């Protein structure tokens, strides 16, 4: 599976600006890690939290609380970039800044009208959000 347009550029931008990156997914780890390796994305992430890493998964905010604790940041300092209502619910419950992209797995539900902090066309547009 290949990354969507702008993903590599966006991840590179975030990494070069010194931000820590984590991948949080509801997929089991046995699928997540090989997918990240095959798509060339694994090296961008300092932490991967899969659906079976903790007792609960998104929309519960526990995965995001875990990441923030590992990175020693407060949730209000963290940003989640997601593509689904589940991502939005988890990030909002955790108190994170929420950015959405209009592609990816969104459980067949449009997220265009969701109340989020920002929406971007692809990850290369993160430069307009990051300070």
Image (cartoon, rainbow, N blue to C red):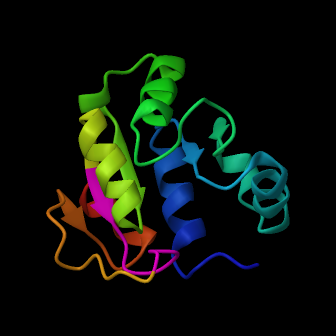
User: How many dots with numbers?
Assistant: 0
Residue 120 percent across, percent down from the top left: 30, 73
Query: Is residue 89 shown in magenta?
Result: no
Query: Is residue 99 shown in magenta?
Result: yes
Please identify the quarter of the rendering in which residue 79 is found.
top left
Image quarter in which the C terminus is found? top left
Residue at the (29%, 59%) spot, across then down: 99
Residue at the (39%, 56%) spot, across then down: 87
Return the residue found at the far front.
55
Image quarter in which the N terminus is found? bottom right
Camera sees residue 36: yes
Q: Residue 23 vs residue 107: left or right?
A: right
Residue at the (36%, 80%) spot, across then down: 109
Q: Residue 47 vs residue 56: left or right?
A: right
Q: Residue 10 vs residue 45: left or right?
A: left
Find the magenta span and give its range: 98-107
Residue at the (31%, 56%) spot, across then down: 88
């Amino acid at each position: 599976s290949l990354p969507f347009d702008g993903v590599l550029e966006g991840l590179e931008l975030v990494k070069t600006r010194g931000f820590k990156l984590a991948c949080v997914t509801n997929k089991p780890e046995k699928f997540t890690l090989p997918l990240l390796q095959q798509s060339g994305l694994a090296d961008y992430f300092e932490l991967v939290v899969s659906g079976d890493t903790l007792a609960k998964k998104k929309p519960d905010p526990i995965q995001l609380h875990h990441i923030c604790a590992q990175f020693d940041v407060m949730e209000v300092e963290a940003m989640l970039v997601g593509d689904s209502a589940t991502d939005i619910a988890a990030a909002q419950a955790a108190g994170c800044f929420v950015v959405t992209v209009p592609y990816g797995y969104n459980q067949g539900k449009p997220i265009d009208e969701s109340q989020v902090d920002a929406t971007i066309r692809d990850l290369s547009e993160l430069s307009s959000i990051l300070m």
